[in-house]
Image (cartoon, coloured by chain):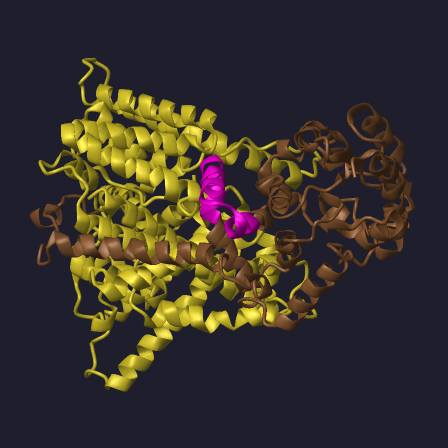
Amino acid sequence: MLFNSYQFIFVFLPVALIGYEIAGWFHRKAVIAWLGFVSLAFYAYWRPALLLVLVSSIGLNYLAGALISRRIPNRVNARVWLTLAIVLDLAVLCWFKYLFPSLNFLSSALGSSRHWTDVVLPLGISFFTFTQISFLVDLYQGIAKQQDLNSYVLFVTFFPHLIAGPILHHKEMMPQFQQDRRYRLNPQDLAVGLSWFIMGLCKKVLLADTFGRGANPIFDADRLSAGDAWMGALFYTLQLYFDFSGYSDMALGLARMFSINFPLNFNSPYKAASIIDFWQRWHMTLSNYIMAYLYTPVQQWARKRRQNAGKGVSRKDVTAPGAFAGMIAFPMMFSMFVAGVWHGAGFQFVVFGSLHGFYLTINHAWRLFRHKRTPGPPSHFFVRTGRHVCSVLLTFVCVLVGFVFFRARSAAFAVKMLAAMFGISSSPALHSSDLLPRAAAIPIGLAICWFLPNTQQILSRFKPSLQESAWRTEAVPRGFLWSPNMGWAVTIGALFFIMLFKIQEPSTFLYFQF
Amino acid sequence: MRIDLTEAELAPPATFLSDEKFRRYLFMLFAAPVVLGLLPFLLTRLPGYEQWTPDEDFPALEFSFKTTGQNAGIVIYGDSSAKHGLDPNQISAELGVKAIDLPGSLSELLVDDDLPLRRYLMANRPPRLIVLYFSPWNFDYGHFDPDLFPIYDGMEVLMRHGTVAEISSFAAAHPLFAIQFPLMFYRLGLDSRLLSKDRNLRREKIDRLAASMGHEDSPGLLHIDSGCVIPASLIDRIGSDWVRRMGAKYRTQKTRVLLFAAPIPNCTNAQAVIDRASRVLPSAPPSIMPASLFVGDDTYTHLFAAGVTQATQSLIDAARPLLADSVR
């Protein structure tokens, strides 16, 4: 079920909220059970048969958790259960997501005409698989505690995050499910959550879909002029931004309606002044996940190898090229390669991930080696500002190049498009009458990304999300700070109505495919 | 990765504002869309709405409700094949009885059923003959899935002319459509650049309809090719329940009812339509006319002006004996 559909807005959400209120009259456990139940119904709405995949995955992982934590007494080493569960999780993920696309890729690479029919990808399979793997790893390491089944089901399936994240960590969620508080509808949370949800809906419907209509014909074209290629890349870069940002706002807003705070997932990434900064702002929960469960373990393994070989592993040692390659570049390239593949089975996703791995490695090297120089006197305000603007623009162009691979139907097409963008090869313009009027929206989209406060800043007086950093109001102009007054109510209400008639043909979110 | 929640993070947000303030905010937030949502329902009831509605087809549908005192001897009611394919003035001239067409469309029938005919009969003397005139594949319109058809026209007519009971009954049966009505109203308004600017064109259209007693030339430009094939989806749709029942409802001692199937284009499979219509329809099978006389749209039933005289003549021939039998 799509958040931007009438079924969700007029039927599912009111029923879920009313049920939450009624369950709250009884007991916390009734609330947890109700939210788990409606989340499963939410998932089953698209294809009921695929609920079996989700339920089986939850059942098997919960069983593995019980075996690892010895809640089910056994003598087998916990590591064996953990390995088995992870292998099984990844095998299911690979079957649905990678096996048939990989076979088709190999088939065409080897010149065979055989085509394997894809199986239907269960929505959100990457998200619920990764969420559960991290829980099992933490359970094994003693960081997590085995939960009762209802809480675990809700942790994995809670509908605002089930399909496209944010990727939740048990330590962020479980305390909120077990907190001794009043489980009833709270007017403040409803007001903040609903306003946030509508702001996200606006981003999706008014902005992302508009830019998407510009990007699609260009990415479907066979030949492109330099102007078309730039336009297409900018359209898509803005579409993806507003689509994912809108989705994240809606997810966080929905959770807030039930008085549950999610971690931030999106924090004005195009304002980033470096690639490291970008990944701390874009899909933040995925970045955290990759850091915690991929980058850090690989880096620790590399450190241990160096230590065993009698080599230094201190901060100073890392500045040596060999150590940098082993302890920073390799873990980074590996992690981002996996992050790329996580997004899809095509070669273009491998390039996307590897390209960002390369960017991040360069960025880390720059930080390490530049800091070796002695700092000069503080520079003038204009110099600092100019440097910052250049950094933001350079980061944006790097990200834009990466997104060409992310969106392109193949890596070869992405290369062709980049060649057109940078004047290496070019064809006559597409001459589509629709494109030029739409192009006028590009500066508006960029201005929104670069100069306006984001939604959590707008809501910062009311504790949006878990991170304390999102509660700071200092940098936000007063006029943008949301408060429950008549002006905001009428504006948000009118926007809501406009969205309702714009979503008569709802479109899916880009991150649903991952 | 940061994994522990602090006390501050678990604590509820600062409560420097009362719950009452948030309740009022939520009330105002919902009031805005409710007011905007109700506005189209009120606007459609305003006098002169047909002159500035964003729906270009609406003036034709409105004609049926502006016929008080016409007291025609022959009343034609049907789908768009009647609106575009018959000339009531020709019928009047040949049969010597005043004829009127109540223009309709399939999407209107799906919502309103026979509302225009009911309203006409309430405001006029009973006619001697009611002609129920439909293309062969629309005889059973009441059983079609409304999801497959754009039904805005019909909702617009219902909201303008329906009673509270009629509107409520529709809304109860199709709640989503009732919610969609104001949304479609605004979307159509935006698509047609915020309501019709050229009122003169609308007025001319309304005057033309009044002068022609409900006939409107088909707006299409392309004609059907001679090698055409009538889609199987249309042929499969041929049924009769709905119109048969309507015929029984209106047949009285004073009023005869003629069920009439509109002509079809001479496509390669026209005979298959005739065969099925002969078996299923409670009317004579449709006549076949040259494909070039039909507009090339997906209805396979809209005639160009050049075909109207011939189609009208077929109806006159069928109506003449019934009219002779009827009580004067």
The answer to which quarter of the image holds residue A490 is bottom left
At horizontal 47% and vertical 55% (from top left) the residue drawn is: A502
Q: Position of residue A333 (x, y in %)?
A: 39, 51
Query: Closest to the observer: A61 or A253?
Result: A253
- State yes or no: residue B168 in magenta: yes
Q: Position of residue A458 (x, y in %)?
A: 25, 63
> What residue appears at the point 46 percent right and 61 percent down from the top-left corner?
A237
Residue A293 x %, y %: 29, 41
B12 within the magenta span: no
Of the chain colours in the picture, the one used for chain A is: yellow
Chief secondary structure of the magenta portion: helix
Colour of the chain lettered B: brown
Left or right side of A87 for A217: right
Q: Considering depth in this image, is A297 or A374 the residue closer to the camera?
A: A297
Q: Quadrant of the N terminus of chain A?
A: top left
Q: Residue placed farthest to the front in the image?
A: B328
